[in-house]
Amino acid sequence: MKIIIVTGATRGLGLAVARQCIADGYKVVAVGRTMTEELAFLLQQYSECIDFERYDFSDTEGIHLFAVQITKKYGRPWGLVNNAAIGRDGVLATLHERDIADLIKINIEAPILLTKYILRPMLINRCGRIINVSSIIATSGFNGLSVYGATKAALAGFTKSLAREVGKAGITVNTLAPGYMETDMTSALQGDRLESVRRRSPLGHLATVEDAAYAVSYLLSEQSSRVTGTTITVDAGSSC
Amino acid sequence: MKEKIINIITEIASDSGWEIVANLNDDTVLLESGLDSLGFAILVARLEEELLLDPFTMMDEPVYPRTLGEFVKIYENCSS
Ligand SMILES: NC(=O)c1ccc[n+]([C@@H]2O[C@H](COP(=O)([O-])OP(=O)(O)OC[C@H]3O[C@@H](n4cnc5c(N)ncnc54)[C@H](OP(=O)(O)O)[C@@H]3O)[C@@H](O)[C@H]2O)c1
């Protein structure tokens, strides 16, 4: 069974990706801080296909050891989905420096470090898939999300150069850019603001976490072996 | 250690179809040995898996060895 590491798999998009990976026949290593009912249910139903590894990515110093232990326990991974992130919003002029530092640490420093060390077993295998979850906000911008948007644009930039670096070793690196999806991260966006996001979609509705998880499924598959350094946008057309 | 490292270099090169210089010795400049920077990364990954250590991550300051001799020494110091 091919191993896929999914960060932030306790809820939202990461959980949907974990579900899709199980359906696709992978073994999932779900990483996050807090067990949820939904994840516990998956673990119980598909105990052969999914394991939970608790990790808090604000501890960037421990990421090397964490990656080494994961590889030792589960074997060399086939895929890494860098999905965990925080979405703290607030206008820059009043956003606390601590929040700025946390956003940079969890959304960009941690996935870069995790990728560095999970990449190594992939290099030995000379195959693998890395998927970085960015956002359409990386390119479109959104009032109150300047720092979050900067981290998401950084991740998309990371994809491009890394894809060039590791392509010769048969590893692909791609970005998923979801539009607005209803999850805990976006629960604060309600009412008129939510309606205006919905109106922007030519399809008249929003993308779901399942829609985005299908795109991840494609990027993880053998069939995507000639797709690298690119971005797949799943936003019900709202940025077109 | 040196022998182990040279064996791995040769293995990586033959897996990738790269040509390695005939006489690998302490003065061989790593990036002129026939391994490119990706090959070098694969070498560090292989050694980490086999020796369970990555001396470069353990160092406080970034160190980028130039020659095979410098590279071997780093691993020897770290595993002793
Ligand atoms: N929702 C959207 O509309 C939207 C749009 C575009 C892009 N995205 C991107 O999609 C991804 C998933 O978003 P989501 O909406 O599913 O968010 P979410 O519901 O808030 O879930 C975030 C996930 O990240 C994990 N996480 C957060 N901080 C962590 C930390 N310090 N250590 C370990 N895990 C941590 C959380 O797990 P624990 O709390 O258990 O640690 C959780 O599983 C993110 O990269 C986000 O930027 C979302």
Image (cartoon, rainbow, N blue to C red):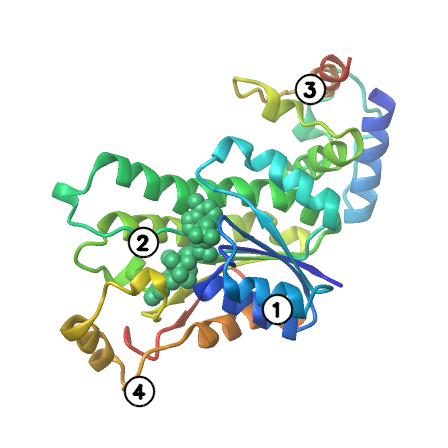
Tell me: is circle 2 under 8 Å from ligand 1. yes
Q: What amino acid does circle 4 point to?
A: Leu
**Is residue A212 left or right of A207 when viewed as pictured?**
right
Q: What amino acid does circle 2 point to?
A: Gly
Ligand 1 located in image quadrant: bottom left
* Residue A21: mark in rendering: 1
Q: Residues within 10 Å of mark 3 (few under 14, many from 20)?
A: some
**Is residue A24 left or right of A36 when viewed as pictured?**
right
Find numbered disc 2 in the image and state the secondary structure of the residue it sits on. loop
Query: Residue, x 51% and y 64% (percent of image)?
Result: A37
* Residue A203: mark in rendering: 4
Tag 2 subunit: A
Q: Image height check: is A37 above or below A60?
A: below
- Whether residues under marks 4 and 3 lie with C-beta atoms below 8 angstroms apart, the answer is no
Find numbered disc 4 in the image and state the secondary structure of the residue it sits on. loop
Comes first in the chain, label 4 or label 2: 2
Find numbered disc 3 in the image and state the secondary structure of the residue it sits on. loop
* Residue B67: mark in rendering: 3
Tag 3 subunit: B
Q: Are marks 4 and 2 on the same chain?
A: yes
Tag 4 subunit: A
